[in-house]
Image (spheres, rainbow, N blue to C red):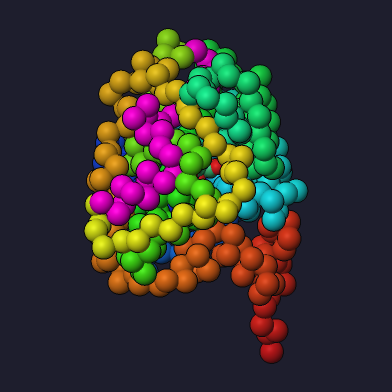
Amino acid sequence: MRILINGNMGYIGPVLVKHLREVFPDVELIGFDSGFFSGCLVDKQFFPEAYLDRQYFGDVRKFPPDILKGVDAVVQLAAVSNDPMGKAFEKPTAEINREAVVRIAKLAKDAKVGHFVFASSCSVYGAGGEGAKSESASLNPLTAYARSKVGCESGLASLAGPDFLVTSLRFATACGMSPRLRLDLVLNDFVAGAIASGEITILSDGTPWRPLIHVEDMARAIEWACTRSAEQGGPNLIVNTGSNHWNFQVRDLAYAVQEELGNVDVKINTNASPDKRSYKVDFSYFQSLAPAHYPQVSLSEAVRGLAEGLSEAGFHDPDFRNSDYIRLKVLNDLKAKGRITENLDWAKQPLIPVA
Ligand SMILES: NC(=O)c1ccc[n+]([C@@H]2O[C@H](COP(=O)([O-])OP(=O)(O)OC[C@H]3O[C@@H](n4cnc5c(N)ncnc54)[C@H](O)[C@@H]3O)[C@@H](O)[C@H]2O)c1
């Protein structure tokens, strides 16, 4: 078996690759990534791509079809991957997250790839109402990022068939330790604040609902999607991916971190205007389809894993919201230095004139 992971050099990719290497020791694993965050490693002496058989560098908008030869499953992670980045880079967000993905899926179908796994997002539901959103709920994407996921899901649906199983995993918000850690995720931010300054600052009034999933549970779900049969969900499966036990109010996440780590102040912004991105999600369908791959990590394990990982890395930066752990900051720095363009292309000119 051969699995291609597009966008393997981000936050989720390294955890996924390690997981796939563990459960499928003999599978050929191939990575493809533009490398925007290649240097953003917690441990600069360990390159997580070592678990792969091959690594390609390139842009999904110019994807070389030859890479698909002999591939059984494509996992599509590559994306402009959150709301703030989607706002700052709106045009390439549509190109990378939707147009390129649908094009690669067409190429994959032509190349007789059997499974196409797309990392979608629960943010497609937008502002929430009272009940938990099941897959049949109406979509209300509020941002360029969420709109790109909705557009991509529908573009992929038209390609699915008995020999080309498409799985769009509508993931909850990720959390947990990774070799390329991000601190622009709610739980990770809270643990980092607790460790760096003994303080968790909630930017909202703390009431919004947010479903979460641990990055290792995301990897388990992707493993399932790479190997599922058509009987498990049909040719085009769109499924909420997370756990019914992991719908949290943001303030309760902060209190959970406080309880787990101790000696932490929680500051809530009581003057904040209501956060529109509040939603609960129903993950029952995923549970019924893939009971053995339903999330397993507990909230306290997630918090402890982050705290241990950050402590091992010697992390103590109270200004981490302005550091390389924040994806938008990394892209803005690359742009300011002329290394990437505003269309998220690597600059073609050498930075230092060659004598
Ligand atoms: N992290 C979350 O909370 C979450 C939740 C739901 C869904 N997802 C989705 O999961 C996927 C992976 O998320 P992540 O957190 O690892 O994101 P990430 O930003 O950490 O990683 C994305 C990777 O894609 C690569 N990439 C971006 N543009 C590219 C291009 N034009 N060509 C080639 N590679 C490119 C980047 O270099 C990076 O390595 C994304 O599609 C994201 O939307 C993430």
Q: Residue furthest top?
A: 231
Is 50 colored magenta in this rendering? Answer: no
Is 253 colored magenta in this rendering? Answer: yes
Please determine whether, in this image, residue 170 is positioned above or below residue 78: above
Residues 198 and 171: in front is 198
Horizontal side, residue 13 vs residue 276: left or right: left
Residue drawn at (31%, 27%), measured in percent from left and top?
Answer: 293
Q: Residue furthest bottom?
A: 355
Residue drawn at (53%, 25%), measured in percent from left and top?
Answer: 130
Which quadrant holds residue 174?
A: top left
Position of the N terminus by quadrant: top left
- Asked if residue 183 can be seen in this view, the reply is no
Residues 296 and 59: in front is 296
Which quadrant holds residue 212?
A: top left
Total marks placed: 0
Please determine whether, in this image, residue 77 is positioned above or below residue 326: above
Residue 244 pos. (x, y %): 37, 26
Residue 237 pos. (x, y %): 51, 19
Residues 30 and 310: in front is 310
Q: Residue furthest front?
A: 270
Residue 145 pos. (x, y %): 64, 42
Residue drawn at (26%, 63%), measured in percent from left and top?
Answer: 263
Residue drawn at (37%, 29%), measured in percent from left and top?
Answer: 243
Please determine whether, in this image, residue 286 is positioned above or below residue 29: above
Horizontal side, residue 108 vs residue 42: left or right: right
- Asked if residue 344 can be seen in this view, the reply is yes
Residue 260 pos. (x, y %): 24, 52
Position of the C terminus by quadrant: bottom right
Which quadrant holds residue 214?
A: top left
Q: Which residues are drawn in magenta? A: 234-259
